């Protein structure tokens, strides 16, 4: 029935009524905080393009994880900032690498906190690409199958350190299956895989690459990351990762990809993660610093809208702030 019998504003009249009928809410335990583990920093190093984000030595990673756990944040996700790089990215699977040491330290101090590790080579290769380079035909192509093997090795090193979940972000074909097989072979059949299933070649990763020193030294990532124009392909990627054994599926970036969060949620029955990436964080921080918008209101609106689109969990550099705001309103 239409107006005047139906009046949509009836249920908007008071805060209590609005709360009662709110379809989507924010919860700290559905947020994941990304952390940069530096192998060279001796103290917190601010990332200039991401105010409030730091490259952290291992001891500081543990301190930060403790704060986040205290605020009820659901998980941390670790990224390495490498001391040494080579053509293969061998630092990625160094059992004494920064990420591996940080995982062990966090699990020892905070056994309950879920620790997810990003699995990729770009932070460890001297050329900055997410895979090894095949130069045999004179053209610098990323060698898919050789890379997949190294990713499986990296994921296993994270599991050995005690990671609760591994998250491959490279976009090579077949890596989820290879990582699953590698983990199972070593007795880590209970370690889940969060696949960066639909990861786009995006302009919004700029600040991350500054933080992790992982900008490609030549070319770009468009031969492995997805074309922003492609939606059906995102669903295919998600279905393939699910078939290879992924336990959760990610769509990345988040803000301009709500349609794909919804589509992947509809087509695959796995839990869905959205990655609210570095450039999306930097935009809000810059606008807030300029006084152009209310940071708290904008961040809460963004995180809520990603959940509404279908994300079960949201990975965001705003996780700590959001958890703090949520604890104040309770
Ligand atoms: C590594 C990786 C990247 C991000 C997550 N994992 C960078 C890239 O693909 O260039 C981006 C995260 C962000 O921008 O916040 N492959």
Image (spheres, rainbow, N blue to C red):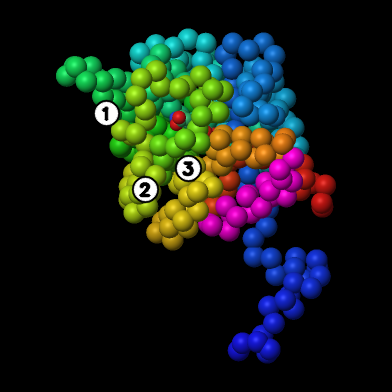
Q: Observer-nearest residue: 271 or 10?
A: 10
Q: Image check: 83 left or right of 235? A: right
Q: Image check: 25 left or right of 81? A: right
In the picture of the structure, the residue carrying the numbered disc 2 is 229
In the picture of the structure, the residue carrying the numbered disc 3 is 252
The verdict on residue 293 being magenta is: yes
Residues at discs 2 and 1 in contact (Cβ within 8 Å): no
| Span highlighted in magenta in the image | 291-310
Dot 2 alpha-carbon crowd within 10 angstroms: few under 14, some 14 to 19, many 20 or more: few
Q: Look at the magenta stretch and give its main secondary structure.
A: helix
Under circle 1, the secondary element is helix
- Check mark 3 vs ligand 1: CB closer than 8 Å? yes or no: yes
Q: Residue at x 51, y 15 (%)?
A: 82
Identify the disc placed on residue 145.
1
Q: Decide: is 183 above or below 273.
A: above
Q: Quick one: label 3 or label 2, which is nearer the N terminus?
A: 2
């Amino acid at each position: 029935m239409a107006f005047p019998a139906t009046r949509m504003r009836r249920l908007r009249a008071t805060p209590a009524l609005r709360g009662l009928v709110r379809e989507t809410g924010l919860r700290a335990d559905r947020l994941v905080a990304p952390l940069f583990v530096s192998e060279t920093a001796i103290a917190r190093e601010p990332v200039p393009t991401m105010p409030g984000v730091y490259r952290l030595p291992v001891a500081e990673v543990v301190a930060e994880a403790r704060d986040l756990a205290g605020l009820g944040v659901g998980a941390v996700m670790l990224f390495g900032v490498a001391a040494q790089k080579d053509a293969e990215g061998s630092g990625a699977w160094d059992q004494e690498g920064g990420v591996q040491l940080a995982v062990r330290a966090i699990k020892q101090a905070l056994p309950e906190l879920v620790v997810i590790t990003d699995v990729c080579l770009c932070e460890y290769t001297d050329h900055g690409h997410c895979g090894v380079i095949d130069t045999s035909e004179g053209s610098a192509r990323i060698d898919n199958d050789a890379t997949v093997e190294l990713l499986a090795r990296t994921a296993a090193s994270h599991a050995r350190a005690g990671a609760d979940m591994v998250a491959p972000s490279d976009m090579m074909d077949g890596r989820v299956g290879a990582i699953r097989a590698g983990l199972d072979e070593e007795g880590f059949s209970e370690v889940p895989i969060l696949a960066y299933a639909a990861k786009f070649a995006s302009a919004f990763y700029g600040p991350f690459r500054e933080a992790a020193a992982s900008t490609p030294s030549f070319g770009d990532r468009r031969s492995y990351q997805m074309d922003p124009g492609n939606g059906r392909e995102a669903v295919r990627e998600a279905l393939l990762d699910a078939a290879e054994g992924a336990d959760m599926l990610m769509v990345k970036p988040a803000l301009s990809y709500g349609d794909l969060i919804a589509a992947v949620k509809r087509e695959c029955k796995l839990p869905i993660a959205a990655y609210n990436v570095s450039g999306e964080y930097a935009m809000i921080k810059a606008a807030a610093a300029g006084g152009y918008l209310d940071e708290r209101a904008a961040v809460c609106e963004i995180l809520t809208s990603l959940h509404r689109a279908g994300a079960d969990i949201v990975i965001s550099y705003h996780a700590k702030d959001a958890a703090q705001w949520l604890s104040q309103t309770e």
